[in-house]
Amino acid sequence: MSCQYMAAFGSSLLRSSITFGVLSPLKRPNSIPLFQSSFQHPVRQCARRAMSRVSATHDDEAAARAAATEANSGAPTIFDKIISKEIPSTIVYEDEKVLAFRDINPQAPVHVLVIPKFRDGLTELGKAEPRHEDILGHLLHASKIVAEKEGIVDGFRVVINSGATACQSVYHLHLHVLGGRQMKWPPG
């Protein structure tokens, strides 16, 4: 049952659950519960999930703002260190222009990042210039190759976060290839 459904009908479900004593354990006079129900009310589950998303979103936004302040420093990014093999990664695909590797914080059963090996000023999509057309096309084609290798070519999503407002956290252009589950709309 979806959280939207639960929010719409939650109060009546909650009232009926309380009426039947599902949410309140029976207590002895000394306040020690006789039993502890493992049932968690769906409305409360959704609220708990929503609160954790709000907290995570706030953290993501703060990290994105912090990353944006250093975006133009020219310092090597974590992706530069992965390209140079200073930091290990699970490589899914590589050619002379791009590297694709598994995300360490996957948001789907398949979550692979596809990055250009040379930044060439392309820290985010919003900074793309006509000279970047070839690499941008190559990144999209590499995403399709990754989808084939991962067995998700029949249904996958490619996401590019550009700038702090989009929660871009690494200023080295990268594409997220997501799949292996039913995607929802709208995505963000």
Image (cartoon, rainbow, N blue to C red):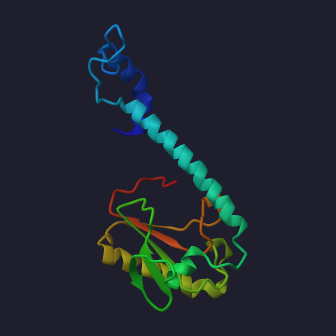
Is residue 173 visible in the rendered image? The answer is no
Q: Residue at x 34, y 7 (%)?
A: 29
Relative to 78, is 2 above or below?
Answer: above
Can the viewer see residue 154 in this picture? yes
The image quadrant where one finds the N terminus is top left
Q: Position of residue 35 (x, y in %)?
A: 26, 21
At a point 43% along the width and 22% down the height, the residue shown is 11
Between residues 159 and 98, which one lies in front from this camera angle?
A: 98
Residue lying farthest bottom? 96
Number of marks present in the image shown: 0
x 61%, y 83%: residue: 119
Q: Position of residue 113 (x, y in %)?
A: 47, 72
The answer to whether 170 is drawn above or below residue 91 in the figure is above
Location of residue 70 (image quadrant): bottom right
* Image x and y of residue 12, in percent: 39, 20
Q: Quadrant of residue 102?
A: bottom left
Q: Is residue 149 above or below residue 160?
A: below
Q: Is residue 103 left or right of residue 69?
A: left
Residue at coordinates 38% horizontally, 22% vertically from top-left? 14
Give the farthest residue toward the left. Answer: 35
Question: Which is nearer the eye, 158 or 122?
Answer: 122
